[in-house]
Image (cartoon, rainbow, N blue to C red):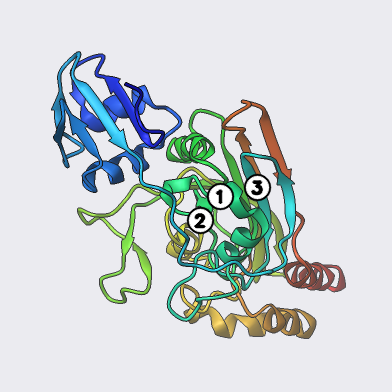
Amino acid sequence: MSLPSNTLETRAEAADRLDRALVQAFPDVSRTRIQALIAEGAVTVEGRTVVEARHKVKPGQSLTIVLPDPIAATPQAEAVALSIVHEDKDLIVIDKPAGMVVHPGAGNETGTMVNALISHCGESLSGIGGVRRPGIVHRLDKDTSGLLVVAKNDRAHHGLSEQFAAHGRDGRLERSYLALVWGVPERRIGTISAPIDRSTANRQKMAVSRGANAREAVTHYEVLERFGTPPAASLVRCVLETGRTHQIRVHMAHIGHPLLGDGVYGAGFRSSAKKLSETSQFALKALNRQALHATTLGFEHPVSGQALHFESPAPADFATLLDALRLNNTEQ
C-alpha cells in the first residue's frame, strides 16, 4: 500500500540518534526541521511516537515522518522594494538597506524583509518548515546594511545552514564587512577570539563573557585606512569566523575601538566626534547608525555546488562619511 504524499518512511541503517538517522535518510530536510517534527510528535519508530531527538534507534527499525501541510505565514505579504543581487529557484541574495528589519517583531510588525520576500517569492517559499516563510539562515542588524542570502526551500535551507554552521572553516563560506571604528587597533591585522553571551547588566545588549552559556566568537580584522593625525578613526575590514548577535560591534568595542555611530556599544565615544572635521561630524550625524556594511558574501550553491561570490559597495550614507574622513586626511 502506498504511503500518503505527506509521509516519509525509511529504515535505520545503523545504531544512532533518531534525528541523525533521519537526516541521513532524508538529506533534503534540515536537521532543525527534523528535530522540530520529532518534538511535535510527527515521528514514529516501529509505529510508536517518539518525541526525543536523542532517542537511540537500532539498525533495521522502521522510521516514519508525517509532514504537516503548509500553513499560511503569520507575516503578511507586502509590496516592499527589495534590492535583489541574485535569484534562482533555490535562493535569493538581497542587498539590505540600513533601517530594514529582517524578521517581524514587537514594534516592527510590517515593512520587514520577510514581508517583502513573501510578496516577491509567493508559493516558492511554501516548503520551508511547513510554513510559508523565507528561510533566513543568517541575519543583519536593523541598522547594518549589506548582503544577505535567503533559502527558498528546505533543500537550500539545509545546505546553506550547514555552511553557516561550519563558520567558513571548510572554505565554502566567506563573509566580510567594512566598519569605521574609533581610533586605530594596535595591530594592523589581528584576530579577536572572545566568547559572547547576553549581558548580565543589560539584557538588551551582548557582551564578551566567560560564563557557561557564552558561545565561541571569532572575528578577523585588517586596518585598511587611518584618518587624522593622530588618527581619530580608521576603516577596518572584518571577516567573520562565527556569526554571533552583534559580534563585530561587541568585539571591536571589546578591544577599545567601537564603531562610529554605535550608540549601544560606543556610547562612551560620543565626545570623540569633536576630533573630526566639521564635514565628517555632519556626515556622522547624518549616518545616524553604526558604520557597518556587509560588503562580501560568498558561498557554495546548496543545490548546484557552484561557487557564488557577491560584492556590495558601501551605501551612500557610509560612503559620504568615508569620503569626508578621507578629505580631512588630504587637508592636513
Label 3 environment density (alpha carbons within 10 Å; few <14, some 14–19, many ≥20)? some
Q: How many marks?
A: 3
* Disc on the earlier residue, 2 or 3: 3
Residue at 51% across, 52% down: 136
Q: Tell me if 246 is positioned left or right of 117 in this view.
A: left
Determine whether 331 is above or below 37 in the image: below
- Measured Cα–Cα span from mark 1 to mark 2: 6 Å
- Measured Cα–Cα span from mark 2 to mark 3: 13 Å
Identify the mark at residue 133; answer none if there is no mark: 2
The residue wearing badge 3 is 92
Identify the mark at residue 16; answer none if there is no mark: none
Q: Quadrant of residue 151?
A: top right
Dot 3: element: strand
How far across and down, in percent of the image, does residue 96 sit?
66, 61
The residue wearing badge 1 is 125
Which amino acid, by three-letter code, is at mark 2?
Arg
Which amino acid, by three-letter code, is at mark 1?
Leu
How far across and down, in percent of the image, does residue 30 sit?
40, 37
Determine whether 304 is above or below 43 in the image: above
